[in-house]
Amino acid sequence: MNIVSWNVNGIRAVYKKDFLGWFKSENADIVCLQETKAEESQFPKELKEIAGYNFYCSSAERKGYSGVCVWSKLVPESVTAGIENEKFDNEGRILRLDFKDFVLFNIYFPNGGASDERLQYKLDFYDYFIEYLKKFKNKKVVICGDYNTAHFPIDLARPKENEKNTGFMPIEREKLDTLVKSGFADTFRHFNKEPDNYTWWDYKTAARSRNVGWRIDYFFVSENLVKNLKSAGILKDVQGSDHCPVKIELSL
């Protein structure tokens, strides 16, 4: 089973950049998007009706902001938007799909850069979600999405310069430490320990052409799923957003 995750920075924008062509060529079993910036009614009709896939989406109360969606060849037993907390759920950041063999979370974690209040919101989001995961301690769990945090110095091109910047502050990175301690594994690092592997590049500085990036898009899986991991990768050549897709292959 192949699962792909991608922050598209606007579904309507990426749709104009041959998103559908990429989607069909990838032929993944499940595709998860973040930062769609659209309500379901604003998705192009042909994206909601891709043959062979079931489509699910969650949008923010605020127009043109946040949002996540999932296409799945498998029919889930249930689909839930949110994590049972209105403070976080009204921003359309979470879709949970419960399948027979595993639970999938597609999440667009908050960015803490706008203000001190938003940084605290981001930290509170992490804390609440990690506590919420205890409900699934006996399940196999996949958590994909844009985490908006680089975990270790190897995960960004310029760690020293960014230690005081949101996305790499110690207080943010500690949340990923907590996630790991609670029983989850970073799938990419399970296979690849090399530097210079990034998933986001700043548009304004043309950072992608120089590979001055950050790895902030992840698949974490519960420890009871690690044995089912066949591969994990970064699709760095896929254009259309300031992020690129990431993917995993599971044997289930």
Image (cartoon, helix red, strand yellow):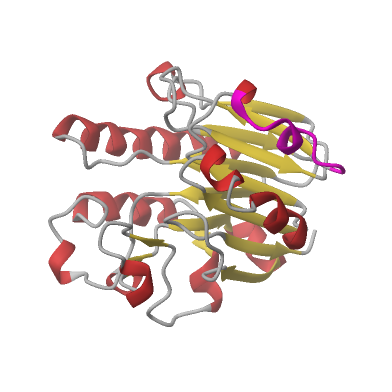
Give above or below for 37 relative to 168.
above
**What quarter of the picture does the C terminus occupy?**
bottom right
Give above or below for 145 relative to 199.
above
Give the residue displayed 42% in from the left and 56% down from the top. 242
Give above or below for 190 relative to 87.
below
205 to the left or right of 106 = left
226 to the left or right of 218 = right
**Whole-percent x and y of residue 53?**
81, 41
The one nearer the camera, 126 or 10, is 10
Q: Which residues are magenta?
A: 42-52
Give the residue displayed 83% in from the left and 37% down from the top. 75
Q: Which quadrant of the figure has residue 70? A: top right
252 to the left or right of 20 = right
Q: Which quadrant of the figure has residue 33? A: top right
Q: Which quadrant of the figure has residue 138? A: top right
**Whole-percent x and y of residue 153?**
27, 71
**What quarter of the picture does the N terminus occupy?**
bottom right
Numbered circles on residues, count: 0
15 to the left or right of 157 = right
